[in-house]
Image (cartoon, rainbow, N blue to C red):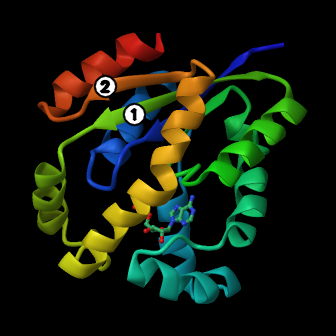
Amino acid sequence: MNTGKGLIFLGPPGSGKGTQAQELSKELNIPHISTGEMLREAIAKQTALGQKAQAYVDKGELVPDELLLGLIEERLNEEDAENGWILDGFPRNVPQAEFLDQLLQKLDKFSEQAINLEVPDEVIIDRLLLRGRKDDNEATIRRRLEVYREKTQPVLDYYRQQDRLSSVDGNRKLQEVTKTLKTVVA
Ligand code: AMP
């Protein structure tokens, strides 16, 4: 039974996926789930997860899967995620995508759609330097882009092969991108 909508926002750091996910989350009334946000919160509170994750986040490396998979499973089982959700920053590698598929098969109620926000590298670097988060310094940005190419790009192929990927030009005004996204997910 496919009742809910599971949207997976892919795209490099700085592609605007967090902002767009937030907009669409309000529009569709489904939660915006950002693993980066969850990790930053855990780090700020210095929880056990936060302490383990901090060095990876600071360096722009992926946090090991075993720290995140249980967290995502719990989050997707929460009540507000019953009718759908927007995932932002997960899956970041193919094993995470496979884990998500298995999880959703168990829940048996979602049709997943992956969306790739396309933005050229030079625009990304400018945007990230302007944003000024702790992990937005030039060395970490460079590493995050490399990690994106190595680990996350194959996730695009994973969804493309299953015919579940839509690509949207993210190098436009915020409102124009939102407008396109609304038609793509409708
Ligand atoms: P983001 O806010 O999505 O740019 O994520 C910030 C940082 O959190 C990333 O550079 C990673 O260190 C970590 N992170 C977020 N999501 C994941 C994930 N799905 N798998 C591994 N690490 C992640």
Task: Say what amino acid the circle numbered 1 marks.
Answer: Asn
Q: Name the residue under label 1.
A: 116
Q: In this view, does 131 lie above or below 121?
A: below
87 and 168: which is toward the camera: 168
Pointers 2 and 1 in contact (C-beta within 8 Å): yes
Label 1 neighbour load within 10 Å: few <14, some 14-19, many 20+: some
Asked if residue 10 lies left or right of residue 120, the reply is right
Residue drawn at (75%, 70%) of the image: 66
Can residue 148 be seen in the rendering of this structure?
yes
Label 2 neighbour load within 10 Å: few <14, some 14-19, many 20+: some
Q: Residue 49 appears in which quarter of the rendering? A: bottom right
Ligand 1 is within 8 Å of the C-beta of the residue at disc 1: no
From the top left corner, tell me how far across and down residue 170 is, in percent: 23, 34
Can residue 44 be seen in the rendering of this structure?
no
From the top left corner, tell me how far across and down residue 26 is, in percent: 43, 31
Dot 2 falls on a residue whose secondary structure is strand
Q: In which quarter of the image is the N terminus?
A: top right
Q: Mark 2 points at which residue?
A: 168
Residue drawn at (74%, 31%) of the image: 82
On residue 99, the disc is none
Asked if residue 151 lies left or right of residue 124, the reply is right
First in residue order: circle 2 vs circle 1: 1
From the top left corner, tell me how far across and down residue 141 is, in percent: 27, 70
Residue drawn at (41%, 38%) of the image: 21
Residue drawn at (68%, 65%) of the image: 68
Q: In this view, does 135 lie above or below 115?
A: below
Q: Is residue 33 above or below residue 174?
A: below
